[in-house]
Amino acid sequence: MKMRAITALVWREFLEHKGAFFIAPAMLLSGLFILILFAMIFGKGDVTDIDGVLLSGAQIYRIALAGGMAMWMAYLLVALFFYYADSFSADRRNNSLLFWKSMPQSDLTVLGAKALAGITLFPALIFGFYMIMGVLTYVLGFVLAIRLPIPLIGPIDMVSTWLMMGLTGAVGMILTVVWYAPFLAWVAGLSTLVQRWSIPLAFLIPGVLVIAESTTQLGHAGGARPIADYLKFRSSWGMDDDAMGDKILHGGAMLPMEMIGDMLAHYDWAQAVLGLAVAAVLVYVASEYRRRRIEA
């Protein structure tokens, strides 16, 4: 029964936020497709030549997929930030399951389902749009190659590259969402206290701590700035951008597996597990606050 309730609550999150995670991405994909079409038809640049290197169809396709993944990843993180800043307080007076008012769920179950939707269902939807974009990109290139001198990757190689780059993107998306989980839980927890004011406070509170650290003895002890340094460390992760770009441009058939290996090797697993633990604690504390201090 509990699993069915959580499934229904996750589905409710989709119904209430499909604008951000389904409708808007569909519109973005359509607009991007039209923009690329116009750029390739009316653009004056040569997409087959970068820094004097004549690109093959496979290289162009990999670059397009890598750029698309970066775009969708950025969209996902922004959308999740605003989702968590609102969803934890959006239904704070009613914990009912979907439309059945006689089946209220506990605050921990409700907030747990919201957190679960944000790290499973919504990233999966965005990843689906990324994979659709990969197919549309190839179809567009195939059509334009009929009338323009554009090198085109063969259908078999296209499917192989699409699947392998998709696997790379999936791994990268999972690692990224897990890495930023404590930041998302932080803004979510704040929203139970101050609702939408959690958006500026999520940045203001750490900023005040960093400034206080810099202007007090804490920040001058041996020149160390532990708070600022740790926030800087947790604000990003991954391979060197130049190294990644060089691999995408010059990599061979095993490029995706090499990229996945590099991502896993450079990932700080201890910090990722610690971040998940912090996120779980923040969700639990937020649920207890809702249960004890907010009228149902």
Image (tube, rainbow, N blue to C red):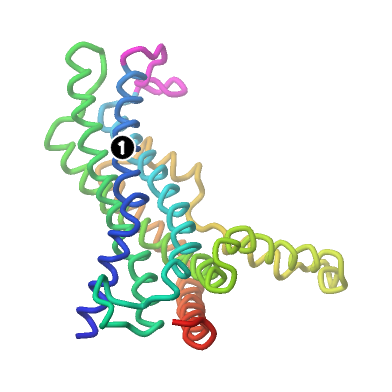
Q: Quadrant of residue 143?
A: top left
From the viewer's side, name the closer residue of 71 and 47: 71
Residue 82 lies, in percent from the top left, at: 48, 57
The C terminus lies in which quarter of the figure? bottom left
Q: How many marks?
A: 1
The N terminus lies in which quarter of the figure? bottom left
On the picture, is 23 further left or further right than 181?
left
Q: Residues within 10 Å of mark 1 (few under 14, many from 20)?
A: some
Residue drawn at the location 31% of the way across and 77% of the way down = 96
Residue type marked 1: Leu
Residue drawn at the location 51% of the way across and 73% of the way down = 271
Q: As displayed, is residue 149 above or below residue 138? A: above
Q: As displayed, is residue 256 above or below residue 291? A: above
Stretch of the chain drawn in magenta: 41-54
Residue 113 lies, in percent from the top left, at: 34, 74
Residue 252 lies, in percent from the top left, at: 29, 41
Residue drawn at the location 37% of the way across and 70% of the way down = 114
Any magenta on residue 49? yes
Residue 117 lies, in percent from the top left, at: 33, 66
Residue drawn at the location 63% of the way across and 58% of the way down = 200
Residue farthest along the left direction in this orientation? 156
Element carrying mark 1: helix
| Residue hosting label 1 | 29
From the viewer's side, name the closer residue of 52 and 86: 86
Residue farthest along the bottom direction in this orientation? 292
On the picture, is 28 further left or further right than 57?
right
From the viewer's side, name the closer residue of 31 and 251: 31
On the picture, is 207 further left or further right than 234?
right
Any magenta on residue 71? no
